Amino acid sequence: MIRALLLLIFMCAAAAQASAQAIYAENQIPARGVEIEYEVTLRNPVSHIYDVELSVRGMRQEAVEVSMPAWSPGAYRIADHARNVQGFRAATLRGQTLNWEKTDKQTWRIRKQPADELHVRYQVFSAQLTDDMADLAGPATFMYVAGQKHVPVRVKYNAPSGWRVHTGLSRNGDWYHASDYDIFIDAPAFIGDFKVLEFETAGVPHRLVFSKRDMSMSEQQVEADVKDIVDATISIFGKVPYDQYLFLLKVLPQPGSGGLEHLNSTRITVGENDLVNQGGYRRFLFVIAHEFFHLWNVKRIRPAGLGPFDYTKEVYTKMLWISEGFADYYANLLLTRAGIQIPEEFYGFMSNEINTLQHQPGRLQMSVEEASWNAWLTSENATNNGISYYTKGQLIGMLLDLEIRGRTANQKSLDDVLRYLMQNYGEKSIAFTEEGFLKALETVAGSDFAEFVQITAQSRQELDYNRYLRHAGMQLDVSRQPSSLWVGIEYDRSDTNLARVRRVIPNSPAERAKVDAGDVLTAMNDERLTFDNFRGRLLSHVINEKVKLTVLRGERLLNLEIIPVEFQDQRWGMMPIQNATPAQIALRNLWLGIK
């Protein structure tokens, strides 16, 4: 009777979670009596070892396979989390040892009698578990039962006294619940004693959990700014698809720079001094906005292939320029709409992104769709033949937003496209295709956008910025910087304080002189070079003068002849035009949220 009552409580909690987080339609199938639960124990945090127990009931097969994910959603690289697994054991719930074999790098096959219930124990090494905290990532910690990822799961954390668990999963007593494995591992956990800030908006609690209790900050300012970002984002979509949200903030000695989105939480790195200096704080707020926007765009409005996931291998999509690029664009736009930055700062940020793209030679060799598809594959020559789908994607997002506004007399925008995608895909727990994205654009704007997508996302041609900026009375000016002597070398400091070539610019004097990446520059016209004097020595020469450059290449000392040329760098600046019409100004104001 007690067993039946506990099972009923578990099933009710799981059902409630499933209805609240019906994210992947493909997973909404009956569990057919299978129950899965985990228990994690932090016996000695300084050992960096998690003790994990996995109990599986109701599987009547003679063989059960359990696997560790090879990668984590949102981080498009093979991490092979199974490499940190040790001490694997399998038994029945009665304690009878079971035979098993490892069938590939991440899978264990366990033999049992059909009636046996399964109990697996294993340990996971994690450098993110220390005597200060557990920074627990689901894909790196929890195995899944092959063929049973749709089954509701629950987990219990046994932590040292005084440590609290912060995770996006719903809680019932000592247990945390998820409607399936995909949702389960999409909820990282901070376990420890932390600084916690909290605010409520849209009737829902939001918490900022800082891993360093004495983190320097103005708490009221941080709460107010993050709340403004959250409110500005919610205003686009109209409602929140969660009952709590967590910002898990890992404090590092060095400046922070990034984060990873999850279903109703995000993990973000932040430098211990980032919130008390202007540049660090602006970057922090940008990442907050980017990751919170992902709550809708990618976690719910998701391209085909991005969930439910195949954790055994790479998952390809051409549409990361939408998922990641648009998140970057809206992060910057939301800071403006929230009043955290002024429009001129928005223009400056987008100008910097344009400059970044225009200085990448790979923009003429790779489309942003190709860059998305190649997310898993970074070429060793990526600086010359690749581009970032973040950078170009956010610029396309801006131009697309303006084009929609221009075509519809400022009545529709990219906001409306996202709402359409949320209503027709996200809320129905299904993924959109490339054709579905085009249909969303056509439905919202009332015109065809196939040509726009072709010339901006599918082709390798230059973006025609002014064609779209003019809708908002904006223009892109290109200015030439003062001329200087140039050879086309990017370099850094070697261990012996010499200039070491990091990159040779294509079609440059250095390439023509056969300078190679990795060369150490030792002398110029037989005078000794250092990292500190290289630029000064170079500038002491004149344009088209032959210069003897001595380089150390491996064990060889080579004399090369390089001929510097005149070079004027170009800078792109986005700014309002002087004679903008009232209609253009009105469009610009509505776009940026200017009252």
Image (spheres, helix red, strand yellow):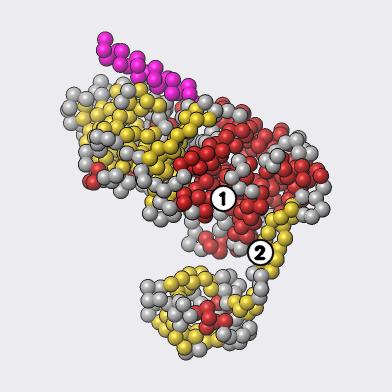
Residue 390: which numbered mark, if any? 1
Q: In front: 155, or 282?
A: 282
Helix, strand or loop status at disc 1: helix
Residue 571: which numbered mark, if any? 2
Q: Is residue 69 above or below residue 147?
A: below
Residue at 21% x, 30% y: name it: 91
Along the horizontal axis of the image, is 219 left or right of 296?
left
Q: Is residue 45 above or below residue 60?
A: below
Q: In front: 359, or 227?
A: 227
Residue 577: which numbered mark, if any? none
Is residue 68 visible from the viewing direction of this image? no
- Answer with mark 2 or mark 1, whichever residue precedes in sequence: 1
Residue at 37% x, 73% y: name it: 495
Three-letter code, disc 1: Tyr
Q: Quadrant of residue 355?
A: bottom right
Rate crowding at label 2 as few (under 14), some (14 to 19) or many (20 or more) other CA atoms within 10 Å: some
Helix, strand or loop status at disc 2: strand
Of the 4 image quadrants, the one containing the N terminus is top left
